Amino acid sequence: MARKQDYVPSEDVIRPFVGQWLMWKQVTDKEREEAGVHNPKPRRPIIPAPTTVPELEPKAGLPRQVVIPYRDKDSTRRGKPADVHGIEVCHAFLDHFPESIKELIHSSFDTKSPLILIFDEEDRGKRLYMAGRWEINREGIKGPFGDIVMVIVP
């Protein structure tokens, strides 16, 4: 007869093994079901990268303030499309129209239209160039940039 200290209930051995097995990415949900293991959390479907681009409509707001309403290009609906977490808007003060998005060195993120940017007094009258792209936050996936637009800071 086994002594109490030598006895290990099978549940104490099996539970950690099953826990590791459930977290192993190579094991599919179907395989878990066939083994009779309950899936406590169903895997969320992967959301593909956005294929559409945002359309920015910057407007002069209060002094030193630029209001940027945005929507999906060619859409009549305001705001972001379904399954998109938010928008990344890259922007920069430049004396010329940028040849590349890489010239827009600053970035702002927003989840609810409009995005409002507030600047310092010395930035009044400067040309602000900007472009935006949709982002899916859960996967960190970003879509393509839309058109570059310009507004003068009031």
Image (cartoon, rainbow, N blue to C red):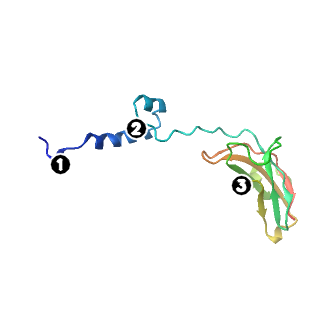
Q: Residues within 10 Å of mark 1 (few under 14, many from 20)?
A: few
Q: Measured along the vertical axis of the image, is residue 75 above or below residue 109?
A: above
Instruction: First in sequence, mark 1 or 2: give its number.
Output: 1
| Label 2: element kind | helix
Q: Pointer 3: what residue?
A: 110
Q: Pointer 1: what residue?
A: 5
Quadrant where the image shows the N terminus: top left
Amino acid at dot 3: Asp
Report whether 154 appears left or right of 92: right
As drawn, the residue found furthest toward the top would be 34
| Label 1: element kind | helix
How far apart in space, not on screen, are marks 3 and 1 (Cα)?
59 Å
Instruction: First in sequence, mark 3 or 1: give its number.
Output: 1
Amino acid at dot 1: Gln
User: Residue 131 at what x, y percent from top left?
Assistant: 78, 50
Between residues 101 and 68, which one lies in front from this camera angle?
68
User: Residue 95 at what x, y percent from top left?
Assistant: 86, 59
Looking at the image, which residue is at 81% across and 59% down?
Answer: 67
Looking at the image, which residue is at 40% across and 38% down?
Answer: 21
Q: Residues within 10 Å of mark 2 (few under 14, many from 20)?
A: few
